[in-house]
Amino acid sequence: MRIAIVADVLGEENNGTTITVKRLINNLKARGHEVFVVCPRCAEEEGYYFVEKIDFKVFNNYVKKNGVELAKPNEKLLLEIIEKCDVVHALMPFPLGRAAVRLCKQLKKPCTTAFHVQPENVSSHFGLQKSRFVNRCIYSNFLKGFYSYTDYIHCPTEFIAGKLREHGYTQDLRVISNGVDPIFVPKKGEKPKEYADKFCILSTGRFVKEKCQKDLIEAVSLCRHANEIQIFLAGEGPLEDKLRRAGNKLKNAPNISFHPKEEMVDLINFCDLYVHPSYAEIESIACVEAITCGLVPVISNSKMSAAKYFALDNLNLYPAGNVKALARRIDYMIEHPEFREAQREEYIRYAERFRIEKCIDKMEKLFADAIAGKRSRQPEETAETAAALSESAAEQQQNA
């Protein structure tokens, strides 16, 4: 197939969306597909076509710091690429993506979209990530200006597919994980000497409000075993300085750094526990990478996060934002190594479903179905879907 990938944001591999999109592109190329990528200037690679970035004037520094530099639509380039492709896959509901889906509609070109940007990711920039009204408005804006132009939406989890149905999205919603790179495998990892006597906790993700890394720092300060714990915060982002200041209050200051995937594999495999405190998450490939290597997680049970569905036991969950409960979970995990060892094997088996090969198979079928105009029946309700819809119904009843 000749596939066009249209991405409003595609820069350094320092965020989940960029990492998963580049993984998709590379795997499609490896299978012999011809892939044309339209995006803001990034890697000088074959098949990439660059557009300018939007000039936000006085807000350019803020935009760059938050890693959300957006592409400026170039209809002439889009037309050139769209006309020579079999199918177009538009990734984000921003100006470049919106221009692409409108042109596809006009040209009657098969087009699919993806739901990688959660409304909470947008509203968090204004401190309104917990405003139901604001997030409903964003869902509506995304639908009207972008998703209504296509019949197919790639949803990384059943959780977000349920949210879309709840907000009136009637398209063919294909639930396909973004997949885990084959490099992430379980192996015996020795701790660096300076951490040999420490209980090492890893948390991965951009340093932004909705990821809630500060909750982990506060929870560790409340642990009975606080002096034995070493936190690793893997990532980068605008809140890095604040996290460093908060972490300096602990006996063992957190190790805060961005790691390429080769280093991440080693880091995951020598750590003792993975903590995912995020408030909003469509999938969280970072969490999946950890459990694929057998690292047992403790996950925030947030209503706005799909990551909670990776929990195989209630002991892998804690109430979102409750740092005392998180501290209790961490202490339990430290005091029960036999529980973690048993769960390690369970998580390795469970994570096989997220292997990238299986996910690319499903993406190929999505593109082939779009070209053929074949819509699938909506998937049967899974336990995850039922739980998400049940939570939503209870929340609506409570607010009535």
Image: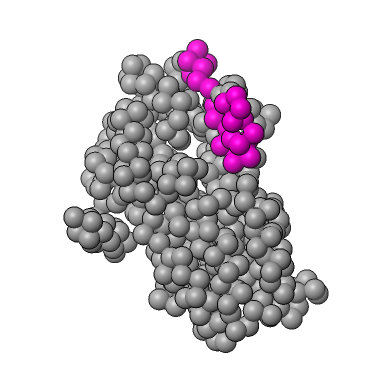
Question: Residue at position x 72%, y 74% from top?
Answer: 251
Q: In the image, what residue occupies the spot 53% across and 44% down?
A: 17
Q: Position of residue 150 (x, y in %)?
A: 32, 30
Along the viewing direction, whichever of 380 and 313 lies nearer the viewer? 313
Q: How many callouts does the rendering have?
A: 0
Viewer-side residue, 357 vs 227: 227
Left or right, 35 with reference to 93: right
Magenta span contains residue 54: no
Horizontally, residue 39 falls left or right of residue 317, namely right
Quadrant location of the C terminus?
Answer: bottom left
Residue 29 placement (x, y as % from top left): 56, 36
Q: Is residue 53 above or below residue 245?
A: above
- Outermost residue on the top side: it is 76
Instruction: Find the magenta span and give its range.
Output: 56-78
Residue 75 lies in magenta, yes or no?
yes
Residue drawn at point x = 35 percent, y = 42 percent: 134
Q: Is residue 27 visible?
A: no
347 over 367 or under it: above or below? below
Q: How is the image coloured?
A: one colour
Q: Quadrant of residue 37?
A: top right
| Residue 285 at x, y percent in the picture | 52, 54
Residue 108 shows in the view: yes
